[in-house]
Image (cartoon, coloured by chain):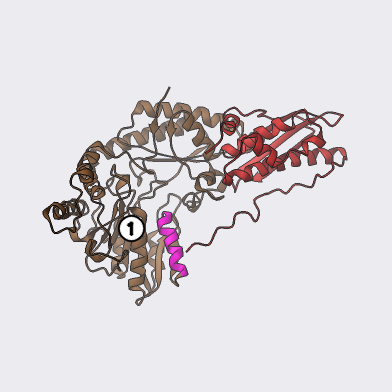
Chain colours: A red, B brown
Amino acid sequence: MYSEKVMDHFQNPRNVGEIENASGTGTVGNAKCGDIMRIYLDIDENQVIRDVKFKTFGCGAAVATSSMATELVKGKSVQEAMQVTNKAVMEALDGLPPVKVHCSLLAEEAIHAALWDYAEKNGIHIEGLQKPKSDIHEGEEEDEEEY
Amino acid sequence: MDRLIYLDNAATTKTAPEVVEAMLPFFTERFGNPSGIYGFGAANKDVISRQRETIARALNAKPFEIYFTAGGSESDNWALKAAAEAYAPKGRHVITSKIEHHAILHTCEYLEKQGFEVTYLDVDENGIVRLDELEAAIRSDTVLISIMYANNEIGTIQPIREIGEIANAHGVLFHTDAVQAFGHLPINVDECHIDMLSASGHKLNGPKGIGFLYIRKGVKVRSFVHGGAQERKRRAGTENVPGIVGLGAAVERAVRTMGERAAREEKLRNYLIGRIEKEIPYCRLNGDRVKRLPNNVNFSFRFIEGESLLIMLDGKGICASSGSACTSGSLDPSHVLLAIGLPHETAHGSLRMTLSEEVTEEELDYVVDNLKEIVVRLRRMSPLYEDFVKRGGVE
């Protein structure tokens, strides 16, 4: 059901861990729905992401999207990191099964949450960045009527 | 390292070679339609009768009370819909439990849309229906109680005889979904006052696509499939003769081997439970320790999610299942684990391993050794575990 890339990033996730005194951290998702992602960013004075780490509680796709998202933002400026959308993460992973698309949304959200934390701490405005929602699942996936 | 350790026998079992052998002639040689007048076809009618007798004996039922179906889900659908409809003039209230299989729960939801009222009983922390609550739920318009014999996820065995006695005392029909229990536990429909019972072939080393519904003589149940005169006109359609023969052979085998098989599986089950509890911290055995199917092991591991666990086990050649949302196709974890009171987070981290008689202790050692490593690995990756350790939890 998963692509080889997803399996690779799940089995050998990149950038797992924590960063002490991180420039920004973000945690999104909730245990109720079964996935939580936390991203740590280390950002230098030129607003370049020097290092990034993540921790994820969730399914294979949740781990793989976290791993890929950290790879995509590493070494980028915060502005460039804003361009890392869920679509970009999915494409880089050669796609996700439809029921797992929300995992890639969560990865994008986690990066944004960490950037938001960084921006707030430093009094910076990042173009296009909005305060992250804590739970991206709200209102999603209504059960279809059955007869 | 191409090991395959199959620990998902509650999902399906290997068709026993002797079962396959019994079935084979009925595909290419003895393929005649049992409704035929000529001997070549009519002989298969007798073949079917013999399977009915084998199954009836296994339940202490009568052969004409056994109706072949396409499996457990069909039997559950039939029992509930047809009985509810037939008894609607007497009342429109049905009682079931919160931990039933979806074949029961979704059929009950359908009945609700048809104007029936359904009471979903809570269960205790081990998944057992409380008899006083059952009795209190019975009303003058209650027509049917449906409680599963044993649970497919956590293996809990219900007090079926007591439930049957209560139903009988109140003149209410009693159906039990015995898909997980039949062929694994001795069942006596008279002693337990069971009016209807669902079972499936492929859970007891029989073929897929065949099952039966036991309907006690005198119970008014409408036809489920209209058409020909098969199954006493209650379930039309040319009989699945190879499937029925396979089911009969599987039941015969299951009855013959039950005692020894259960003893072996129970010993291995307890060994597996013991090792996991001793060697993996922050785990919880789900379900009752004693009133439990001989082959069922179900644990929750805190701070980790079930699908991740399953993929990693799969990487080691171990087949198991989970009640996590990601394996259920919805965002909610297993309704069974929520019903026994697990918080969502713990319910997402569940692992079910269901053994067979073929599993060895050496294989289970391999499973636990790998499971230990995988749990450590996933916890290192988990923000929930990180928070737990930061709050002072011991690693």
- Residue B235, given in percent of the width and then of the height, sits at 28, 62
Residue B388 seen by the camera: no
Within the image, what quadrant is residue B37 found in? bottom left
Q: Is residue B111 magenta?
A: yes
In the rendered view, tell whether residue B387 sits above or below residue B237: above
Q: Quadrant of the N terminus of chain B?
A: top left
User: In this picture, which residue range is highlighted in magenta?
Assistant: B100-113
Mark 1, residue position: B75
Which quadrant does the C terminus of chain B fall into? top right
Total number of numbered discs in the rendering: 1
Extreme bottom residue here?
Answer: B89
Q: Position of residue B353 (x, y in %)?
A: 41, 38
Residue B2, image quadrant = top left
The percent coordinates of residue A36 (x first, y second) are 64, 41
In this rendering, does residue A124 appear at all?
Answer: yes
Instruction: Classify A140 as above or below B386.
Output: below
Q: Quick check: B128 left or right of B385? A: left
Quarter of the image where one finds residue B238:
bottom left
Which element carries disc 1, helix, strand or loop?
A: helix
Q: Residue at x 25, y 55 (%)?
A: B239
